[in-house]
Image (cartoon, rainbow, N blue to C red):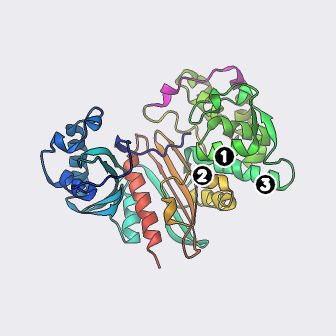
Amino acid sequence: MRLRWLPLILLLALFAPQPATAQTPAQRLKQLFTEHPIPASWFAPTFLQQVSTEQVSQIITQLTQQYGAFEHVEGEGIEYRVILERAVVPTRITLDAEGRIIGLFFSPPIPRIQEANELLDAFRQLPGTTSLLVLKDGQEFLALRPDTVLAVGSSFKLAILAALQDAIEAGHHRWDEVVRLQPAWKSLPSGLLHTWPDDAPLTLHTLAALMISQSDNTAADALLSLLGRTTVEAYAPHNRPFLSTREAFILKNPANQDIAHRFLEADEAGRRRLLDTLQTRPLPDASVFSGGPVQPAIEWFFSVRELCRLIEKVHELPLTQINPGPARRENWQLVAYKGGSEPGVLNFTTYLIDSQGRHYCVSATWNHTERLDEVRFVGLYQSLLQRLRSSP
């Protein structure tokens, strides 16, 4: 239910204009990966107040053990790429006037996989169930179980956006239409609207932008309520009834196992009746969902092919381009993105237009009964995007 696109290896996000120094950032990065032990003299005191040399050494050791020995460094300014045998590590580094590190940031490693079949095998080898679809100018380019229906977390919000776009085009609503925030719409994070005061005025555009760019659950529930559940269900064939995030959180709450069991055993009509009884039940504490998967059968289900249809429909809306997700915006003419993440569930769905005007959809889903290795999934996905950029 929560979109998370956050850096997965972070040491210190303190960046300033790069001063002239005898020690270049590239040289310092090479030292970090090739000289041991790492001395404290390489770091500014402000850095060491937050991160120890032992922590830096531990992260670098993990990277080289998993992805092979250091080869070289590429880049300039504060943006660099540390090239290891089996991966590229996007890195930001800032030095002070004495050549000491004041900022260091490692992004998820991108596996050095060039062949399409190797990429497919890497996704296939993830534990649990994975699916992948790459469309190039509307034609299937790469596919792994593209019609398998899996849980996708917050990527379901593409269905709400598609329904909203059609309702606006039909004249039933307007992007600048103002609604008042209702208490019944308030859900758990992600997002921020659940903290806003009741009756706060919001345009439909604001709700949609927050729903997609920040995966705001309250914004999604507001739009679902305004459009109507059955309207959105036309865009989500495997989700009847189509759950609000508030309803899903309440059903997943371990304290409500009785009603969750009845919900899963009931037919569609019975499930709809049970949803009416949830209105009096409170939201659980968000900590309930901080561990492993909770009630994985209560979810939103789509195939990657269905998600590609949805994002193709809405990709021209500027609000889908606010958050680029795992893609680097500067590498593409257009990046539209929505993802979904919760314990045991990951999906990334991206619509891309390259410098030559070619259109791509890339959607990948991973479901497992245990916590997922998000760094590994992000790296594979970014490696796939890089492969597409270099394809003829």
**Where residue 90 sits: x, y (%)?**
35, 56
Q: Which residues are magenta?
A: 277-290
First of labels 1, 2 by sequence position: 1
Residue projecting furthest to the right: 171
Task: Say which amino acid is labelled 1.
Answer: Ala
| Within-10-Å neighbours for mark 2: few <14, some 14–19, many 20+ | some
- Between 217 and 95, the one lying in front of the other is 95
Disc 3 to disc 1: CB gap under 8 Å: no
Vertical placement of residue 258 versus 101, above or below: above
**Where residue 130 sits: x, y (%)?**
46, 54
**Where residue 134 sits: x, y (%)?**
52, 66
Q: Quadrant of the N terminus?
A: top right
Disc 1 to disc 2: CB gap under 8 Å: yes
Task: Say which amino acid is labelled 3.
Answer: Asp
Residue where numbered disc 3 is placed? 166
Residue visible at 56% across and 36% down? Answer: 190
